[in-house]
Image (cartoon, rainbow, N blue to C red):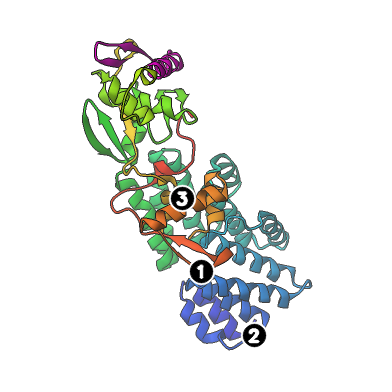
Amino acid sequence: MDSLITAAARALAAGDPLGALKRVALRDDAPALALRGIAMAQLGDFARAKELLRKAARAFGPKEPLARARCIVAEAEIALASRDLGWPAERLDSARSTLKAHGDHLNAGFARYLEVRRLLLIGHLDEAELMLADLDPSVFSPASRAFHELVVAGIAMRRLRTKEARPALARAKRAAHQAGIPALMAEVESASRVLNTPAARLIARGDERLLLLEDVEALLASKGIIVDACRNVVRQANNVVSLAKRPVLFALARALGEAWPRDVPRNLLLARAFGARFVDESHRARLRVEIGRLRRTLRKLADIRATKGGFALVPQRGRDVVVLARPVEEEHADVLAFLTDGESWSSSALALALGASQRTVQRALDSLAAEGKVQWFGQARARRWITPPVPGFTTILLLPAPLPGD
């Protein structure tokens, strides 16, 4: 490897893409193409970066499998950064095996981190933890150790294990400073802010207050009954009753939980559950039916009793009842939760992460765009969506991942 290639590689490792380009911008040999591609990725031009890396992989040819594998790993990193979650994971796994077979354990480990981070993005936390358990961060560079700790912290936050997330972020911060890469230090700082910004609202006895993630964790471990509007479940410790597919029942449960220990007038329950403006006997009959269904569904946690004015929730063993709500409640909040990471997403990647159809996601994006809450750039398959973060809130509880007891 000549001196210019070596100097450019060192510049990229230090997070200096412009310094790398100064050395190889006019060269078209395979190593230079690969380094130019990585530099363009660090500068945010992902389309050009992918084009250069593919040219580099072709230029290396089948006689240089190690170099081609490194190009594939770099391309996978770009796919992850550009939220191209449909990128074929099999290619990355094959490249990782090649790297490991040739003794390049550093890049093989980094390839595994990319797989884990993709699983984390789409909410496959169990698979991500299993893959992460196979890696020993102590043998890697400071930058790779920072990536490892960021993934550990990300999984812990999604599972609401803040006591694991805080030390992982502290280790990530130390490793990022050792690496001396400004972009990595900024990523760690951004992840750390999640623990110190409101994640949910607590509604109890007519009052509201904001909760941090650690407050939510403590609440879910308490003995009270929680009407969880973040996951549309009613829970008490490990006893969880899901109403995610029964929106009418959950609307009734939430109305009763917000009013507890008072009762809720029938007219208000009809408005919350059915959107009824004018009430007749058919509405009252339907309300009685749905209340009966909710009473049977929650029989292990609470009773629902008729009062003179309406209905009231009566928890077993005199437990308190609270409602856990999203910090900001609006339509398509789950879509906005992904877009607030500051990256640009395609509708297909959002559909994969949400477990929804692409058409459903596209309709949500079109609605949000009409309201000025999201913006797009690019055309056709290259179109990407982005929005600025919601100020002062973290969106952890809006992302589709299991909470304790689910």
Q: Which residue is mark 3?
A: 364
Q: Give the label, 1 or 2, closer to the camera.
A: 1
Secondary element at image label 2: loop
How many angstroms separate mark 1 from mark 2 (CA)? 28 Å
Q: Which residue is mark 1?
A: 378
Q: Earlier in the sequence, mark 3 or mark 2?
A: 2
Q: Give the label, 3 or 2, closer to the camera.
A: 3
Q: Amino acid at mark 2?
A: Asp
Q: Which mark is residue 28?
A: 2
* Depicted 263 relative to depicted 135: above or below: above
The image shows residue 242 at horizontal and vertical percentages of 47, 26
Number of other residues with Cα within 10 Å of mark 1, as a class: few under 14, some 14 to 19, many 20 or more: few
190 and 318: which is toward the camera: 318
> Which quadrant would residue 86 be assigned to in this image?
bottom right
Q: Which residues are magenta?
A: 285-313
Left or right of residue 393, residue 73 in this image: right
The image shows residue 286 at horizontal and vertical percentages of 41, 19
Q: Residue furthest bottom?
A: 26
